[in-house]
Amino acid sequence: EAQVTQNPRYLITVTGKKLTVTCSQNMNHEYMSWYRQDPGLGLRQIYYSMNVEVTDKGDVPEGYKVSRKEKRNFPLILESPSPNQTSLYFCASSLLVLAGGVTGELFFGEGSRLTVL
Amino acid sequence: KNEVEQSPQNLTAQEGEFITINCSYSVGISALHWLQQHPGGGIVSLFMLSSGKKKHGRLIATINIQEKHSSLHITASHPRDSAVYICADGGSQGNLIFGKGTKLSVKP
């Protein structure tokens, strides 16, 4: 079954304690991306990757790190989480059908709800 | 800076009604995505289009490149269509820009 898997789904942590949210896809997609969703602000892109070893900042990258060492995995790292990073996080992947932009169907993970105290 | 505007923000309809949700963007795009998010649920892709019109069941999506406008139509709406509908500009390099979403409630 084609899917994007995120872990953990729920996490409560404390300020400053490093954490990693994993994202894995089994569709051999080139494109992977992370978003956060906050009430009233909608979805905002954190980082994206067009292929292995290629990552770029989205609209709200501050406080986050990513890496793309393998095609299937795209972990999101919060080196020193702060309460303003409390949010619902989604990972997504897509096959890049055409050059320039996200031109394939997007597949989303189920979301990871993070609370930073 | 590219912006994506959706209207209306909230929409309440009676079961069976024809529904239209609008999406406007400011910069030329590679593709326009329509997404659906049920309460407490994940996000699923409904359509990805770069021109013309697509149909899937009771859902129809259209795009007018010249006017930088897309619409999502739901025919014969049903309570299970109640969800947030989000449009997104596919960007030029992978930088997706999202609208703030339209919250649809269909009453029986």
Image (tube, helix red, strand yellow):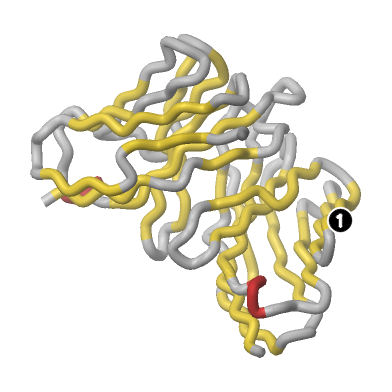
Taking B42 as reference, is B81 above or below it? Answer: below
| Residue positioned 31% across, 50% down in the render | A113
Give the number of marks.
Answer: 1
Amino acid at pointer 1: Lys
Taking B81 as reference, is A56 above or below it? Answer: above
Residue A89 locus on image (x, y percent): 38, 45
| Residue positioned 72% across, 32% down in the render | A103
Residue A117 locus on image (x, y percent): 11, 51
Nearer to the camera, A18 or A25: A25
Taking A90 as reference, is B46 above or below it? Answer: below
Query: Hey, which quadrant is residue B106 in on the image?
Result: bottom right
Look at the numbered disc 1 and give the secondary structure of its residue: strand
Residue A84 locus on image (x, y percent): 21, 50
Residue A96 is left or right of residue A111, and the answer is right
Taking A39 as reference, is B54 above or below it? Answer: above
Nearer to the camera, B69 or A116: A116
Badge 1 local density, few (<14 within 10 Å), some, or many (20+)?
some
Nearer to the camera, B23 or A107: A107
Mark 1, chain letter?
B
Q: Which residue is mark 1?
A: B55
Residue B103 locus on image (x, y percent): 56, 72
Q: Quadrant of the N terminus of chain A?
A: top right
Residue A9 is left or right of residue A44, and the answer is left
Residue A79 is left or right of residue B54, and the answer is left
| Residue positioned 77% across, 56% down in the render | B69
Q: Residue furthest front?
A: A1
| Residue positioned 73% across, 21% down in the render | A99
